[in-house]
Image: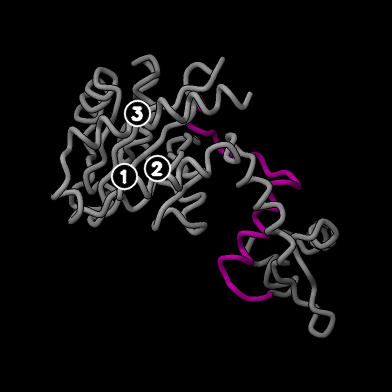
Amino acid sequence: MSPPRQERTKTPLTQGIAVVRLLLQRGYALGVTQIAAGLGMPKSSLHRLLKTLCQIGFLQQNPRNHRYGVDAGIFAFVHEVAAHFGRNMSLDAELRKAAAALGVSGVYIDMLGGRNAYVVCAGGDEGNTMRLGISCLVHTSSSGKILVAQMPESAWPGYAPREGDKAATPHTNLSPARFYAQLRQARAAGFAWNIRETSVDHVSVAAVVREPLVNPPRLAVAILLRHDAYLHRDQHELEQSVLALADRLGRVLAVKR
């Protein structure tokens, strides 16, 4: 399981990712001077980096104004990641089927990255491509809680709420003591809840998906519901549903090895 990340050293790879992120966030093409200013990079080293990004199909340069923008070819790489990361190809159909059978908004596979839980595969009405890569702090995530609960208690403080963390909603927990209590409860029960901690409109419950030979586990499946729908559902039934789904996905992964 990934520990909380340290500050990253600048490399051509990290700088290339920073360039792509800047262009995505701005939403329009930029010139070399604008990119250099936005990232605090010297133009001399940026030229070579932009050329490389164009060669691999991540960026394109407008021949008329010489500005750089994101190339549609980058989606081939995104598709490769989405299709194969965490055995997503094996799980995609199962998630969509589960979302329909359970009558929920979405079903997600999450993984930890530093102090965050990231969606790596999703199915259902709210499990579309816009959800891939979305993340939230572990202590506000049902998936994050159940995954950290599998770790030794000595590792838990690295994922606990800390000074400077902001509450996403009025329901977000910022108490380390309460977080540890939630983890102990999750470890005993086999599932964890997120009751409106990341969105006032949503509730989720998650359980660990166990892959062969992977310990501690790295995947969790979460069932997502809108809060108004959750109020009319049986909580125990949802808990049993996510445990059964996690078991089924684990068996799918075992067969696909």
Instruction: Work out which quarter of the rendered image holds the C terminus and state it.
Output: top right
Residue 119: say if magenta: no
Task: Determine the residue positioned at 33% across, 28% down.
Answer: 243
Residue 88: name its quadrant: top right
Location of mark 3 (residue): 244
Kind of element beneath mark 1: helix
Location of mark 2 (residue): 98
**Foreground residue, 246 or 8?**
246
Location of mark 1 (residue): 102
Left or right position of 70 against 246: right
> Three-letter amino acid code at disc 2?
Ala
Residue 162 appears in view: no
Q: Position of residue 174 (x, y in %)?
A: 23, 39
Q: Do residues under tags 2 and 1 come within 8 Å of each other at their CB atoms?
A: yes
For label 2, the crowd category at 10 Å Cα-Cα, with few meaning under 14, some 14 to 19 and many 20 or more, is: some
Q: Position of residue 89 (x, y in %)?
A: 60, 41
Q: Which residues are magenta?
A: 1-29
Question: Measured along the vertical axis of the image, is residue 41 above or below residue 166?
Answer: below
Residue 13: say if magenta: yes
Kind of element beneath mark 3: helix
Question: Measured along the vertical axis of the image, is residue 190 above or below residue 25?
Answer: above
The residue sitting at the bottom extreme is: 64
> Three-letter amino acid code at disc 3?
Ala
Task: Determine the residue positioned at 36% across, 39% down.
Answer: 222
Residue 102: name its quadrant: top left
Task: Determine the residue positioned at 24% across, 21% down.
Answer: 189
For label 3, the crowd category at 10 Å Cα-Cα, with few meaning under 14, some 14 to 19 and many 20 or more, is: few
Kind of element beneath mark 2: helix
